[in-house]
Each structure stands twice: as structure tokens, then as C-alpha cells.
Image (cartoon, rainbow, N blue to C red):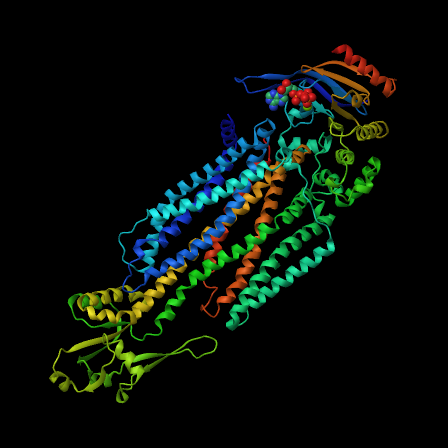
Amino acid sequence: MTEILRVEQVTKTYGKRGEKQYQALKGINFTVNSGEYVAIMGASGSGKTTLLNILSTLDKPTSGHVFINHEDNSTLNANQLADFRSKQIGFIFQDFNLLENLTNRENIALPLSLQGISTKRIDPLIDRIAGRLGIEQILAKYPAEVSGGQKQRVAAARALVHEPAILLADEPTGALDSKSARELLDTMEDLNQNDGITTLMVTHDPFAASFASRILFIKDGKIGKQMLKNELSRQEFYHLLIDHLDTDE
Amino acid sequence: MIWKLSLTGIKSRLKDYLVLFSGLTVASMVFYMFLAIAVNPAFIKNDIHVRTDYLKYIFIFGIVLLVIITLVYLLYADTFLLSMRKHDYGMYMMLGAKSTRIGRLIFGETLITGLLATFLGLILGFGLTWISLKILISKLGLEIPHFQVILPNAIIITIAFFLVIFLVVALANVYKLTHTPVITLLHEDQAPVKFRYRPFLRVIEAAGGVFLLAIGYYVMTLPKEQVFKIIPTALVTIVIGSYLIFAAVFSSLVGLLLKRKSFSYHGIRMFTLGQLKFRLQSYTRVLTMISLLFALALGAITVGLNFDSLNDLATQSVYYDATIVSNSSAVKKAESKLDVISKQTYHYKETKKILYFDQAELSKQPAKYVSVNYSNNRGVTQYTVKALQVNKISDSNAIDNTIFMRMVPNHGQQKVKLVSSKELSKLSGQKNFVSLLRVKDFRQAYPIIAKIESQQVKEKPAFSALVPQSKAAFYGNSLAYSSSFEFMGFFLGFAFLTMLASTLMFKVLSGAAGDKAKYRMLYQMGTRKQLLRRSIKAEIGVLFLLPALLGVIDVLFGLQLFKDLLENPYRSIWIPFVIFIILYSFYYLLTVKLYEKLVLTKE
Ligand SMILES: Nc1ncnc2c1ncn2[C@@H]1O[C@H](COP(=O)(O)OP(=O)(O)OP(=O)(O)O)[C@@H](O)[C@H]1O
Ligand SMILES: [Mg+2]
């Protein structure tokens, strides 16, 4: 099993020296292997978004290192970081973040054209991922013309079309109704199990987390504990999780 | 408390506020200048050569145009102001501030911003007026050593005008914001833009636009007998044609480019094109207006600069450059400075009924005159130089009358009689003389000739009756009007260009808040900052370029309208173009900088 992501002693302190400072992350360590589906759970303010921003190279850790595909982010300059993000990382956000001025197809094409993939190869790649996510019918429409669930699928297609090393998702079901949320989670699970897409999802929703194969709990800026799904079914894992959260309160 | 919030809100957007504020300041500054010139007491007393009291109408006309452009400008500046503050207002309301309080806040903010800008503009306006008057007076060749630049009337009118405008704008803002749901105030940025599809309708619109514009351009090249049909036709077809072109042609072209994947699937192009396609749609009205007003401004400057050639026309109807009736040392001294190419002197005596002229002098060098023929049906006047036929002088001859009218003050009913010089000496009464001069370069000699004529009026008040008929008077008046027009065309054109460019700037910047999320997303996706900047430059560049291009084409055809009036209406067209390019590039770069600051988040 190959290692995709390694987080070593990452800390993050907000606020400049001399001003009032706040340490949001206090030494985070964990690794994610290729093909894993990891969820990070934690209460509000526990540092989830801070961590995800650091993993995705949008923010720099105060100390510590993040390796993606064995490459240390902290050694890269701004342009290299941008290139790194565009190649290695796929994002899904809570609020979709699709470009309203482009059709869904154009939205999905954007990461490829930004990487300079040749024009001829772009459309086949889009068609393949669209087929996988069941959005072939809505490719010609604009984001404003499709439902929230469909938007999030388009966003997922855009995150995956360039075959990133890891898919990062911040509360991807946060803005969806329960049926659309369920469908999206099923799809993500399917992509992980059948296409081997390494996924790291941040959420505070136990239902969403129960789709993962491993759950890391973050509390007060530290990884407190982890739970493994192992041979459990999703329902069993969900109930175990609920019990755990109840006793933890 | 809420005022404190408001101040912090403004402070955080101080730079954007400064841009807006300086725009408003310039508007009131230029407004005051025009007004101060129009009502300036320096121009109420006429110069002997120039009727300056009419000049004010030219400047009042300028003010009317300025009011129009100021209103348009303020409309867009205000939209920008609102776009900056909307989110804050929404937040205060969400936090439970009563909408009447917010209303008062908005009202106060708008009014205070506006009035502060007006006052600052007034103060700067004094300086601008002083400079402008200096330039104008020297251009007119007037001698007005002292003039006022601080005119209570003009100050009151300027303040009243801007007060009324800002009151209306403030009330409109209160209405707009208090009648918008809080949620829209907070999230308007995310609201998707509607896009019209109907490709068929697009094609028709595009074809119609091109067709109408072509008609408009064509009619302007037609002969000018039917100018009253040409101008309305051109106006209607060009306005509608431009609108349709902006509505259909450009965004369709961008749409086509977007569909050509070999072009659009390339780096960030797709995003830039997508932005443009929607922008061009929602900017149809602004871009149309800007292209038309650009054309007007450029045209006004070009034509204004060309009015100078009318001054030569004005002098053509008078043959002699100067009339001298005094041999005082002052006149002689001035005359010695002239580059005289011909001078003829006639002696005469007058009684109540008869003018006695020296026959020998007149026969030797018959006075010449210009015969003006208006009969040409294209409105072109013909000037022919003729000489007095001395042996055929009769008192009923109108031509003879006008010739002698230019030589003898108050010549009207007297009969002209030619006598020998001996007879002339024997007659009782004072022997007068009149010298008719031609100089090498009248334009150059004009100031001296004007001085000689004023001196002669001082010495012989009766001579003042001759002045309005003199070449110097014709030229002086023409010069006054052409210089005023030139000055106004220049200044107004300048004001128009500035305000239009900044209107476009505000329009673009008003959309920045809504684009912030897009650029953040692109950045997160791993788009390099340089690439984002390039996209912004290209997008704003196209938005600036299109109206400029259409405006320039409009001017090039529009100047055809003046080809009968002016010798060469395209003369010195490069001047407004250079000004235009400099001003416009400045605003383009400023817009790009401000926009980048608004949409690109710092790391
Ligand atoms: N830019 C910042 N400056 C200062 N403190 C910050 C900043 N961003 C976050 N924090 C603080 O760091 C802590 C962790 O924030 P973070 O956004 O990572 O929480 P989270 O786990 O994502 O919470 P939620 O579930 O509510 O999204 C919080 O206490 C927050 O107040
Ligand atoms: Mg968060």
C-alpha cells in the first residue's frame, strides 16, 4: 500500500507575533494511503477547515510538514504550489463553487485546459467522468439551471477529471437535502471502492462520516482518536459512531 | 454606534472611496468652471472688436451638455458606491438595525460624500477657472487684465445643482436598499446572471445592427442640402444600430469563440470568454452610450479645433486689411510695425450733402472691393475682387456706397463728387485723408491693426462707425467664436472623455464584488496568479476596447457632416486621438489595478 498523504507535526497559530495569538492546530500527525477513504470529524472551531486549507496548500503551517505523493509542500514557491494544486488535488466545497458563466461541460474542462491538456483529449475525458457520475444529460446547461445535487456532481466531476492524487472535500453534503446528500455519498463511496480514488472528507455529520473507511477525530487542534470501519457494514459503523459520539460528550 | 460602524466600513474601502470621490470632485470642478466663464462680468462689457456678451451662450450650451454627462456619470458612480456598501447595510439590518435607521445612514453617507466632493471641487474650480480664463482671454486677443474667478452666483448655482442631484440620488439609494430583501443585499453577488439564448433572434439582431449602422454611416456622406433629414436619420440608425451590435454581435462572437474548442480549451481562455459573454450582455446599454458619447466628444474636439479655418473665411469679404485716418505719432508708430505690401491714400472733404474726393488719386489707384456671391446652390459663397469704376461713379450705385462707407464715417446720404486736387484745396472745410492698407499676413498683423483702430477711435470718435465694418472686426468676432468653440469643445471633450472612461471603470468595478468568489475558486483550483491577472487584463481590455473602437469609427464617418463647412474636417484629428488614448489607457490601467485589488485575495 503506497502512502499518498503524510502530515507531520503540523501546527498553526493565527495572529502575528506580538498580537493576540491563537493556536488552532497543535501538532497534527497522520497518514493517508492510496485508495483510502478518510473522514475528519470534529466540533465547530476544532480546526477542520484550518487543517484542510493546509493540506490543500492554500495556507501554510506555522511548523511541521505536509507530504503529498512524497513531495514536501513547504519547499515550493507560489507558482509551484499553484501547479501542484492543479495536478495533485481535487476539491469539492460545501457551496459547489461552480462558475456560473460557464456551462457544466466548460466547468469540468477548466482544470484540464489550465493544465494545458491537448484540446482533443479534453472532451473524451469529460465524457468519461460525466458518465461515471451520471451527469451526461446536463453538460450543456449552466449551473444555475440544475439542482443542488446535480451541481455537486458537476463539482465532483471537475475535482476528479484530471485524476488528482487525492480528493479533498469540505462538508460536501452541507448544502444538500438528505436525498441528494445520500446520492452524492453513494457516488463518492463507489468512486473510492471501484476507481480507487483516495478521498479525505471533512464533516461534522456522522451520517456522511459513516461512508468512510477510517474516521479521525479532531479536538482542540489535535487528532484525538481514530475509528476503523474494518469489516463492519455502513449501518453498523454509523451506529458505532453515534454511540461513540454520545459517550464522548 | 451605527455611524461608527459606517465609518469603519468606509475606512476599510478607503481607496475605492477615494477614486469615487475624486471623480465627483472633477465633475463639480469642471461644472463650476463653465459656469464661472458663462456668467463672468469680464465678458459683459464688449470689446470694440468683439461682442463678448454673446459668448456666454456658447458656455451655457456647454453647461447643458455637461449636466447630461454628469448625470450619467453620477448614476454609475452611485451604483458603484452602493455595490461597495450593500453588504454592510445588509449585515446591519440582519443584526436588527431598523430599516429607517439604515435609511438615514445611507442618506447621510451619500449626501455627505457628495457635498464634500462638491466643496472640494469648487475650491479646485477657482484655480481651474483662473487658468481657463487666462487661456481664453489671450486666445480671444482681449485685454482684460483683471477678472474674477470667485463668483457668488456661480458658487450658489453649482452647490444648488449638486445638492439637488445628491438629494435625489440619496433618496433613490434609501428606496433601493430598504426595498431590497436583506438576503439579497447579503448575497446578491451569488445571484446567477440570466442569459438569453434564442440564437435565431440573435442573428436577426446582429444583422439588423450592422445594417442600421451602415445606413447611418452612409447618410452622413450624402450632400448636405438635406441636412435636416440626414442628422435625425443618422442619429436614430446609429443609436439603434450600436445598441443591437453590442446586444448581439459581440457576445455572439464571444459565444462562437467559446464553442470553438481548439481556441477556447486553452489555459484560462475559457473562463475569460465566459466572463465576457455575460458581461457584454449585461453591459449593452452602458457600452452603447459610451461609444456614442465618445464619438461626440472626439468629434467636438476635432471640429472645435477646426473652427479656426472659419476665421479666414470671415476676412474674405473685406479687401483692405486696415483703414488709417490719423497721422498721430501713436498711429504712425504702430503702423511702422506692420509689414505693409500696399498702401493707397485718398483725400476728401465733406459737406452735409456732398463728399468731394480727389479724382486723380482715385483714378490712379481705384479702390478695390470684394463682391460676394451667395447664389451658388450648394451654399458655397464666392468671393470676387473688383475695382471701383471711377468714371462711372453715381450716387445711386450701392456698391460705390459700400466702398465709401468703409472710408468715410457716417457716409450715408451724401453724393460722391470727384474733383481735381486744386478744386479740392479751394473748397471750404477740413481736408481729410483715408489710407487703405494691405499687409503681408493679416492674422499675424491683427493685434497691431486692432490697436491702431482703438487708438484712432480715441483720437477721432467718429471713426468708431467704421470699425464694425473693418476686417479686424470681422476677424475679431470670428476669432472670439471659434476660440470659444475650440476652447469649449476641447474642455468639454476632455470632461466627457474623463467621465465616460470613469463611468466604464465604475461599471466594471461594481461587478467586482460578485467576481471575488470566482477568482478565489480558480486560485484554489491551482491557477497561477499571473494567469488570473492576464485574464482580468484581457476581460477589462475588451470591455474598454469595443466602445472605443465603435466610437472612433463613428467619428471618422461623422466628420463627413462637416466637409462642406470646414475645409478639411479631419485636420488635426490626431490631437483628440492622442488625448483620448492617453486618458483612456490611464483609466484602463487604473481599473485593472483596482479590480485586481478587489477580486484577488492575498495569500
Ligand atoms: N483567520 C483566522 N484568524 C484567527 N483565528 C482563526 C482564523 N481562522 C480560524 N481561526 C480560529 O481557529 C479555530 C479553528 O477554526 P476552523 O475554521 O478550522 O474550525 P472548523 O473546525 O472548521 O469549524 P466549523 O465546523 O465551524 O467550520 C477557531 O477557533 C477559529 O476561531
Ligand atoms: Mg469549517
Q: Is residue A87 left or right of residue B127?
A: right
Q: Nearer the viewer, residue A5 or B115?
A: B115
The location of residue B508, given as percent across then percent down, is 57, 43
Residue sitting farthest toward the top: A247
Whether residue B230 is situated above or below residue B402 in the rendered picture: above
The location of residue B335, given as percent across then percent down, is 22, 68
Q: Is residue B352 left or right of residue B276?
A: left
Residue A62 in view (yes/no): no
- Identify the image quadrant of the C terminus of chain B: top right
> Which residue is drawn at the image coordinates 58% and 64% (left, top)?
B216
The location of residue B261, given as percent across then percent down, is 74, 48
Whether residue B174 is situated above or below residue B61 in the rendered picture: above
Q: Picture quarter containing residue B428?
A: bottom left
Q: Picture quarter containing residue B45?
A: bottom left
Badge count: 0
> Which residue is drawn at the image coordinates 46% and 52% (left, top)?
B66
Residue sitting farthest toward the bottom: B391
Q: Nearer the viewer, residue B526 or A156?
A: A156
> Which residue is drawn at the image coordinates 35% and 46% (left, top)?
B127
Whether residue B505 is situated above or below residue A76 in the rendered picture: below
The location of residue B155, given as percent across then percent down, is 37, 46
Q: Is residue A55 left or right of residue B65?
A: right
Residue B114 in view (yes/no): yes
Ligand 2 occupies quarter: top right
> Which residue is drawn at the image coordinates 56% and 39% (left, top)?
B175
